[in-house]
Each structure stands twice: as C-alpha cells, then as structure tokens.
Amino acid sequence: MVSLNFSHSKDIFIFTLSKIREVYRWRETLRVNSYAVYDAGKGSMKILNYEMIYTSKYIPELDAFLWSQGELAVAKENGKTLLIDAEGHTYPYDMDYDAKIRKSAFPYERDFKTEKVNTSVFPPIPIVENNDDFDNVITEQKKIRIESNSIIWEDGSVIETQYQLCGLIGNVVICYKHVSNGGDWKHQLYGICDINGNILYEPKFTYICDAKMDGDYIFVIDNHKCGLLDYDGKELIPAHYMYIDDCDGNIAIVDHGLKLIDVRNQKELFSIFEINKEEDDEDCNYFMKKIVNGWIRVLKSYYADDSPIGLVKADGTFYSFRMKDNRWWLDSSLSRNGKKYNHMGNTFRDGLLPVYDLSRGYGFIDVNGVEVIECKYNEIHEFECGRAKVRYDVDFGYINTKGCVFVKNGLKEIEIPSKYDWAYDFDNGVAIVQKGQSFGCVDIYLNEIIPCVFPNKIELEKAIAKIKLINSNNIDYCKKIKELEPPLCFKEGKLFGYKDLEGKILCPPVLRHARQFAEGMACVCIGGKYGYINEKMELIIKPRFDWANDFSEGLALVHEIGIGGDFYINKQGECVISAGGLEELGPFINGTVRCEKYKPYKDNDSYVLTKRVQGYE
C-alpha cells in the first residue's frame, strides 16, 4: 500500500503542484505548474519552478516521479527544454534521452469520450419528502428510533404504544393524543413514556420541550402552570408556577424572575418583593435572570445587564449594590470600609468578586466587602481553580486568592515564562497557552502538560474534552492525547503536510491541499485530484475525485466529472448512495441529509436523504 510517510525511505520524490503560480505571457496572466522536490534521505525539500518535470519512474497513486541518484530529469519552462540532475545542475537537451524515458514518464489519462462507464454500480435514489405531520417524523438515536406509535430497537424488535409518538428528549419518549373541545377543532395533549413503552405520564401537558438551561431538564406546562422534569422523567419542580426561568438542580428562579426556591422542597428562599425600592426606581420591575455558580444577579431591567442592584446567594441572602454619584458602591450592611467602585463583576468566584476603581484599577473584594486584592491591575479575569489571570502594564500572569503572584519560578514577578506569547483562563486545572501559531496547555503551577503543537485553540479544546470523558481523575494529558489524537495537518507556505503531537514530520509539506482527520480518514489533494489517507499515512482511497468532503457517519460526499456528479462513498471508496438531481447536499447527521431537488423554471423542492431508506445503515 502506498504511504505518504517517507521516514524509512532514502529516495528523492518529485510532486506536481498543479497551477500553483502565476506568470505573464502572451499578454495575459496564466497559472502554471511548479514541482516540490523532497529528499527523504536528508529530510529537505525545495521548489522547482518548471512547467513540467519528469523522470523514467512514475508513481501514479501519488502523481509523483522517483528521482534516482545520478539520473537526469527532463524539465520544460516557457517553451524551452533542458536536462537537470538532483543537485540542480543543468545540461543541454537530448532528444534521444527524452524519447527513451517519456513512455514510462507520462501518467495514464482517462479518455471520457471513449471510456464506457458502468452505471450499474449506482443504487436507485428513493427520495423521502419532508412532511410536517408528527406521524411521519423519524427520529434516530444510538439505540432506538420512533415511528408512528412504535419504538423500534437496533435488533429489529418493535414495541407498540397506545398513543402516537412524536419525539425523544433525554431518556424518555414524548407521546400525544388529540382532544376535542366540543366542536370540530381539536388540540393535542402530551405525555411521557420510557423507551420500553411504559407510560410515565398520561397525556395531560399542553406543552413540553427540552429546557434551554445548563442542566438536562424537560420543561412542561399543565393547566397554564409550568414545571420541570429531569431526563428520566422524574419530577423536579411540580407544575405550580407561572414560569421556570433557570435551574441548577439545587435552586430555581421561578415566576418570571420574581422568586428563588429550593428544588428539593419548593421552599421560597428569596422574593424580589423583599427589596425596598429606591425613590428613583419606583417604576422599575426588579427581577432575577440566571444562576451562575450559586449566585444570581438582581437587575433593574430585563434588557439592561449593566444595571445590577445586588446579588443573591444560593441560601437566599441578598447583598445590595447602590448607585451614587454615577458610581457603584456596596451597601453598608455588606461593606466594612465603605469603599466605592465604578464597576462590579457578575458573580463571586472562589469567594471573590472583581471590582474596578477608575483612579486605581481592577481588584477583588470578598463577600464582606473587604478589598482582599488591591485595585492596581490593568486587566483581570475571574478566578478558576484558585487562579485568576491578570495584567499589570504590559506583563501578564496568574494570581492566587490571596493576591500573591503565582508563576513557575516563584512569587516575585507577574509574568508568564517568555517561551509563551499568550495564555488563557484556567478550566478544571488546565490553562491553554500559545506559542507563535501553535497551542498547548499548562497546569496551575505552569508545568507544561501538552506541548504547543496544536494548530488552533479549538482542536486542542476538543482533545482535552475527549480525554475528560474517558478519565476525569489523575489525567495524564500528554500520554492520553498521544494515544487518542490523530496526526495534525499543518501548512508551510502554500503546501500542506502532517506531523504528530511531538512535532515529528509524518508527511512532508508536499500536498496542494489537506484537511484534519475525521473518523480516522483525512482528505488530501494529489496532482489536482482528491483522495483519502488513514492515520498511518497510507493512501486508502486513490486520488480520483474533483472535490471531496470529510467523512461523517461512515460516508463522504464526493464529486467526479464524467461518472455521475455527486455521490456518497464508504471508507473503501465504493459508491453507496447516488445523489443525482439533488442540490445543497452536506454530511449525514443522525442518518439524514437535508437537501433540495432541482426543478427547472420552478422553485426547488425540499427533501430528506435518509441512510435507512437508501438501504445503508
């Protein structure tokens, strides 16, 4: 099998860079070829600007030539032909030598005019039209899917229920029934059953949906009152309230931000009506908006987040702010020294609240109003894992909750070691750092646990999240990432290559285009055509497509001129789903692709392409 990993080779390879540079000829600008010459023995590469170079040994899978030591290559540029050796020396053109090697030098080119295409490999295209009725909606999950009044498992077993089904939320299935109001008009009531078809709630709710909160909750309305269930259907908050604004599992904001209750016993912890309004605020409707780490901001207006009047703790204790002389300051019941601040943060973290004084700078106070960390910094971030990122003048670093500057070499200066260009906030004991255009991460003592090899911050965050799912305690990030993460794509100039997490080059930058790995496969462009490689740099699907997308759910959308337009291939390169006549295609998500059916002189129809209907699961 052909591999792009040349670490065990000593040969010289010539890779075609199709139409990569612009030249001005014949009164117009043309795009012409160049060639990347990679010496695997020395690990070096150079670019030769010729419109054509070839030797006697051609590798069709890589669209590359093998250049043996002592062999002369034929090169052409601007109508002139000459011979060159591997060291770059040029020699006069020899027609007999050229005729000798050109037969094996030129690759086979497909003649679409005479070549007959076997269209029998393309399966038929049954189209599933969109339907707004709940009866025809198919929802696919990892183990089950629902259809009409049936729950269908992966092994083919079917469980029928007495009610129609319309969706899944968490670990439960939503059912419904039609209820008449005495006339011709009917409305629906919703209930909940488990995935085995057992009814947990008879259809009685007028509305049910996935709650848009940080936790996993189900929002229900019963007789114009709102309640909350967990993802297993267990009742957390009975449907007794006008609205459920937010919930963190322990406390909840209800009745449009007016009350704070204990989720366990529905005891009222705090009410907005307990606050005595200032004379200027008689027309204001105070309310609570969101729970953040057990603290809730009380605001004057729903549309103005910059108008806080205080903070409510999870136990219902209220700490008030006051605005006087255009400055925020702490109420005397909270502050011990009566210091005033121009601005205060959203919530307490590690018992500290960020504050800002216009004349001094940023600092932190505790819940008693004591200024624990002096207001002297030009920039501060909230505490996480006992560390907060701060900036003093042009230097930045981390401080602990006592205000001590905490860096790797001691407590003397506010600075990150000079090998990093920038650093980000801590999250679960890990902070991302940046060096040049690469990213890594450090622990709370600034020990490097992942070297700066990731090409962007998002890819590193994905890798860290993947590791936490596997082992949340005592994580050896560096070891786990080496085991789990595929090679990284990097760009050098206009060319692409791959390297491992230690920076070792696996594939030199000789590719015209390449993408990051998805489902163990990466799309690469070789000789103007697209194919796929695996994580061992082996060419699994030969470059033959005019364009190609990443794999998703085992399939990739590709296009090949002269073969049938767009179609989906599996990881063996076989066409499994044809997409003739369809537009706006994309990757499969939950077994389906939303697309459009082309209609000349009319608006396109919307369709859903489904793997199950196509016979591919």
Image (cartoon, rainbow, N blue to C red):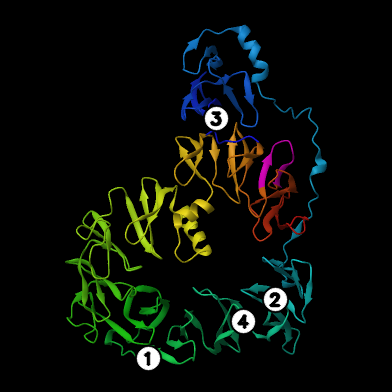
Mark 2 and mark 4 in contact (Cβ < 8 Å)?
no
Which residue is denoted by mark 3 in the rendering? 9
Which residue is denoted by mark 1 in the rendering? 273
Which of the 4 image quarters holds residue 2?
top right
Which residue is denoted by mark 2 in the rendering? 195
Which of the 4 image quarters holds residue 63?
top right
- Near mark 3 (Cα within 10 A), the count class, few <14, some 14-19 or many ≥20, is few
Which residue is denoted by mark 4 in the rendering? 233
Q: Earlier in the sequence, mark 4 or mark 2?
A: 2
Residue nearer the viewer, 27 or 405:
405
Span shown in magenta: 557-568
What is the distance, in whole Å, between disc 3 and disc 4 at their CAs?
61 Å
Rendered image: mark on residue 215: none
Q: Residue sitting at 79 percent across and 27 percent down?
A: 114
Query: Which amino acid is tagged 4?
Result: Gly
Mark 4 and mark 3 in contact (Cβ < 8 Å)?
no
Query: Which amino acid is tagged 2?
Result: Ile
